[in-house]
Image (spheres, rainbow, N blue to C red):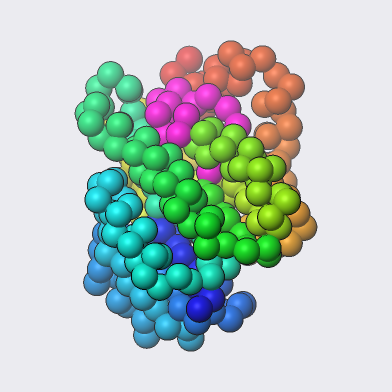
Amino acid sequence: MKIAVITGASSGMGREFVYALDRDEEFDELWVIARREDRLRELQSKCRARVRPLALDLQDRASFAAYRALLESEKPEISVLVNAAGFGLFGVFTEMDMDKQLDIIDLNDRALTAMCHMSIPYMAAGSRIYNMGSMSSWQPVPYINVYGASKAYVLSFSRALGVELEKQGIRVMAVCPGWIKTEFFSHAIHDNTVNYFNRYYGPEQVVAKALKDMKRGKDASVLGFPERMQVRLVKLLPVKMVMNTWCRQQGKK
């Protein structure tokens, strides 16, 4: 049974990956993972492939056991894994709830790592892994520091894992977009600390670019010419200068 597994599938980037993969490729099943089962079931009437809703909270380690048990029972061929589950918080580090910030690490990094570790044994040559990073993967970002650091992990982990899996023919890519118009913002904005967003992209644009970049053999996908130039610049400029520029944009300098 050939399947795609998509986390964070109830909204935003995860849902857009579901639509794109279902439209462009053939799968026996799409395993869609998120907490909101009602949202997952809505996908059943919108996809050509059979959709299997898996209502799992990936911040809860018990969900890993449930996913592993399903893999052992079904023994599928995982053609595509998309790790799109994640969230962030914008604000002053010391003024935001500590447990919620630790939850960011649990979902953005721990769950992503676990999903890769459990899924790879069921992959073969030609299988692909898309891990959701961010433009913040490339630089430290004050007032988004935990989220940004969690996405830096995603980029580093994805690139290193890709090298390890190269001989098996399994490709890994970090998807690192700028600001995207999704529900992310309704949960992320803690106060008015971060208030400057220079441009937005649609999730469908990000996914289309990611699918193309994977075919081109890239290990990271960045949508937009300004964003690609920014990635180059932050590699050349002093880190403090990059952070100060960001702070000035937010009115903090």
Is residue 85 on the magenta stretch?
Answer: no
Question: Which region shows up in magenta?
Answer: 133-150
Query: Is residue 241 placed above or below 3 in the rendered structure?
Result: above
* Nearest to the observer: residue 62 or residue 253: 62
Q: Position of residue 201 (x, y in %)?
A: 55, 54
Q: Position of residue 216 (x, y in %)?
A: 77, 57
Query: Is residue 241 placed above or below 168 in the rendered structure?
Result: above
172 with respect to 7 (left or right): right
Kindly give the residue lying farthest to the right in the view shown. 216
Residue 188 appears in the rendering: yes
Q: Position of residue 251 (x, y in %)?
A: 45, 23
Residue 22 appears in the rendering: no
* Nearest to the observer: residue 10 or residue 206: 10
Is residue 146 on the magenta stretch?
Answer: yes
Q: Position of residue 205 (x, y in %)?
A: 59, 61
* Nearest to the observer: residue 210 or residue 6: 6
Q: Residue at x 48, y 71 (%)?
A: 76
Name the quadrant containing residue 72.
bottom left
Q: Residue at x 28, y 19 (%)?
A: 94
Q: Residue at x 74, y 22 (%)?
A: 236
